[in-house]
């Protein structure tokens, strides 16, 4: 039974009246896998996470957590710690009191609550603040208390909706490090975020959604470099004189070239997945046309270029 996915959704659709917020979303998060959910504002990330956590019902489709249908909410969610639009606790409460309350909800006894509270508050660097009212905390500190709540029951599966939004850079790094440290304990994570860096640093796989539909999902490496593993490279070429239509056409037609984007009058970005000889030919081609090469920069294709591809032409809904 060990290959039962941590999270599996099949054909999730959620409509609000006649508006379809998500459509036919099928995702699989395997045990021990960290998956990032990326997409522009209004793409349907929060809606997907809410349906997965059983906070709202899908119009159609199904969700299984560790093989248990989310309709059996209590049993399925026993494995899950999640933070999705959690209501703010009372400002007069302290982190220790909030965790005590959450611990009781999960049926933990006082001793377990004390041990787990210390563990999660230390992980989130909030131990020294445990007896202070959260009303006086910064947004980042409150967010860390909220994350501590999600981690309190020591869940195998963690679902987080933009956990680092509103945190300062140090707060972001600390939360990311805390999440990375949980990997060693074989947890699974589904996290929505607008931070591509968060996905590339933390997640082995990614799902990109746009207009409520999954545009791509799978291992980050395979999506970025293609399944065959032929490494994509991006050549940024800067010239002294403007690129002519003829040179652009020749570049587009050159062997190994996947796409050519003009990034300025005197600069182009060439997406390339050919051999070293073919790469040499591209540089020669520009050189021979007499534009005067000022610089050639080579960089690997990354999540950023994949994201830009997947969300091209998309506007905020
Ligand atoms: N309760 C609701 N009633 C009607 N429409 C809704 C409701 N909740 C969400 N929507 C709509 O569904 C779409 C998807 O919203 P969702 O919050 O899932 O997007 P998101 O990807 O989380 O965006 P963001 O990055 O801004 O958080 C949006 O167009 C939103 O306006
Ligand atoms: Mg959202």
Image (cartoon, rainbow, N blue to C red):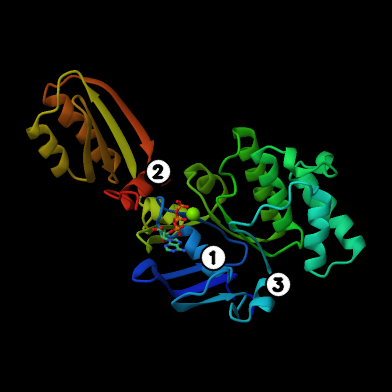
Image quadrant holding the N terminus, namely: bottom right
Say which of marks 1 and 3 sits in front: 1
Whole-number angstrom distance, CA of label 1 to CA of label 2:
26 Å
- The reply to whether callout 3 and callout 2 are in contact (CB within 8 Å) is no
Decide which of 15, 312 is in the foreground and name it: 15
Image height check: is 263 above or below 112?
above
Residue drawn where x is 75% and y is 61% of the image: 154
Left or right relative to 125: residue 166: left
Label 3 crowding class (10 Å Cα cut-off): few <14, some 14-19, many 20+?
Answer: some
Image height check: is 117 above or below 299?
below
Label placed on residue 184: none
In the rendered image, which residue does mark 3 sit on?
A: 78
Residue drawn where x is 22% and y is 44% of the image: 259
Label placed on residue 304: 2
Q: Earlier in the sequence, mark 3 or mark 2?
A: 3
Query: Does residue 21 show up?
Result: yes
Q: Earlier in the sequence, mark 1 or mark 2?
A: 1
Label placed on residue 50: 1
Whole-number angstrom distance, CA of label 1 to CA of label 3:
16 Å
> Quick check: is the Cβ at mark 1 less than 8 Å away from ligand 1?
yes
> x%, y% of residue 273?
29, 46
> x%, y% of residue 208?
41, 57
Left or right relative to 141: residue 285: left
Image height check: is 105 above or below 280?
below
Label 1 crowding class (10 Å Cα cut-off): few <14, some 14-19, many 20+?
Answer: many
> x%, y% of residue 97?
83, 53
Helix, strand or loop at label 3? It is: loop
Decide which of 288, 17 is in the foreground and name it: 17
Whole-number angstrom distance, CA of label 3 to CA of label 2:
35 Å
Decide which of 236, 274 is in the foreground and name it: 236
Helix, strand or loop at label 1? It is: helix
């Amino acid at each position: 039974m060990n290959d039962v996915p941590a999270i599996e959704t099949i054909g999730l659709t959620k409509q609000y009246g006649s508006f379809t917020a998500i459509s036919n979303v099928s995702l699989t998060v395997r045990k021990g896998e960290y998956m990032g959910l990326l997409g522009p504002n209004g793409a349907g990330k929060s809606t997907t996470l809410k349906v997965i956590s059983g906070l709202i019902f899908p119009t159609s489709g199904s969700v299984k957590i560790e093989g248990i249908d989310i309709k059996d909410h209590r049993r399925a969610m026993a494995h899950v710690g999640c933070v999705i639009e959690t209501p703010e606790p009372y400002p007069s409460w302290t982190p220790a009191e909030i965790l005590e309350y959450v611990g009781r909800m999960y049926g933990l006894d006082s001793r377990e609550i004390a041990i787990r509270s210390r563990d999660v508050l230390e992980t989130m660097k909030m131990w020294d603040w445990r007896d202070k009212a959260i009303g006086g905390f910064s947004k980042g500190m409150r967010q860390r208390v909220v994350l501590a709540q999600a981690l309190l029951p020591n869940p195998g599966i963690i679902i987080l909706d933009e956990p680092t939004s509103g945190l300062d850079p140090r707060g972001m790094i600390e939360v990311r490090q805390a999440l990375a440290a949980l990997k060693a304990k074989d947890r699974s994570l589904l996290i929505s975020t607008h931070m591509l860096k968060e996905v590339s640093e933390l997640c082995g796989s990614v799902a990109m959604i746009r207009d409520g539909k999954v545009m791509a999902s799978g291992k980050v490496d395979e999506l970025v470099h293609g399944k065959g593993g032929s490494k994509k490279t991006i050549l940024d070429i800067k010239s002294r004189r403007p690129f002519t239509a003829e040179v652009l056409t020749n570049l587009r037609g050159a062997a190994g070239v996947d796409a050519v984007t003009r990034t300025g009058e005197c600069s182009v970005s060439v997406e390339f997945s050919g051999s070293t000889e073919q790469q040499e030919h591209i540089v020669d081609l520009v050189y021979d046309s007499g534009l005067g090469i000022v610089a050639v920069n080579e960089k690997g294709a990354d999540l950023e270029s994949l994201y830009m591809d997947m969300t091209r032409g998309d506007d905020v809904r």
